[in-house]
Structure formats: C-alpha cells, structure tokens
Image: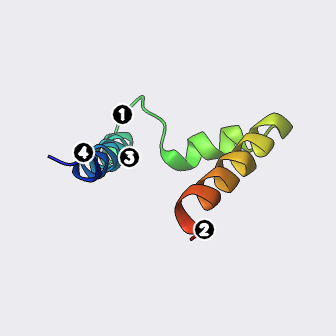
C-alpha cells in the first residue's frame, strides 16, 4: 500500500467521522453540538476568528495552491 493510498484513507475516514458526528448532532435530544453551533461559538471571539482564518490560509496553501 502506497503512502498516497494511506493518506487518502485517513482523510476519507476523518470526513466520514465528521459526517457521522453531524448526523448524531441532528438527532433529537443529542448533546453533541452541530457544526454550525461550533463555528458560531468559535467565531464569536477575536482569537477564534483569527484561528479560523489561519486554518483557512493553511488549507489554501497546502491543498489549493499548485
């Protein structure tokens, strides 16, 4: 198995866990916050906004710049 295949499998599993958590958060009576609530909480503070912008810049540099 190549390192590329392992990397794709890891990213796919992370995405599937994220989708699973979002679905679990949508269930009635769930104590898990939805992704929208998490981002609303993060974006309510200045350090949170700076962190989100830094993460977005990192993603842009590593995945979208070729």
Furthest toward the top, the residue is 31
Q: How far is mark 3 from mark 2, CA to CA?
A: 29 Å
Q: Earlier in the sequence, mark 1 or mark 4?
A: 4
Q: How far is mark 2 from mark 4, CA to CA?
A: 22 Å
Furthest toward the right, the residue is 46
Nearest-to-viewer mark from 3 and 1: 3
* Quarter of the rendering occupied by the C terminus: bottom right
Q: How far is mark 3 from mark 4, CA to CA?
A: 24 Å
Q: How far is mark 3 from mark 1, CA to CA?
A: 14 Å
Circle 3 packing at 10 Å, graded few (<14), some (14-19), many (20+), is some
Label 4, on which residue? 6
Tally the marks.
Answer: 4
The percent position of residue 22, horizontal first and vertical second, equals 38, 46
Residue depicted at x 38% and y 41%: 25
Label 3, on which residue? 22
Label 2, on which residue? 65
- Kind of element beneath mark 1: loop
Give the quadrant of residue 48: top right
* Left or right of 43, for residue 24: left
Return the residue nearer the eye: 20 or 37. 20
Picture disc at residue 29? 1
Residues under numbered marks 3 and 2 in contact, where contact means CB atoms less than 8 Å apart? no
Furthest toward the front, the residue is 2
* Left or right of 4, for residue 54: right
Q: Earlier in the sequence, mark 3 or mark 4?
A: 4
Q: Earlier in the sequence, mark 3 or mark 1?
A: 3
The percent position of residue 18, horizontal first and vertical second, equals 37, 45
Nearest-to-viewer mark from 1 and 2: 2
- Kind of element beneath mark 2: loop
Return the residue nearer the eye: 17 or 28. 17
Residues under numbered marks 1 and 2 in contact, where contact means CB atoms less than 8 Å apart? no
Residue depicted at x 58% and y 40%: 38
């Amino acid at each position: 198995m190549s390192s590329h295949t392992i990397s794709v499998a890891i990213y796919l599993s992370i995405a599937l866990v994220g989708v699973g958590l979002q679905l679990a958060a949508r269930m009635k009576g769930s104590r898990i916050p939805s992704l929208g609530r998490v981002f609303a909480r993060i974006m309510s503070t200045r350090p949170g906004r700076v962190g989100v912008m830094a993460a977005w810049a990192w993603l842009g540099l590593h995945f979208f710049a070729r």
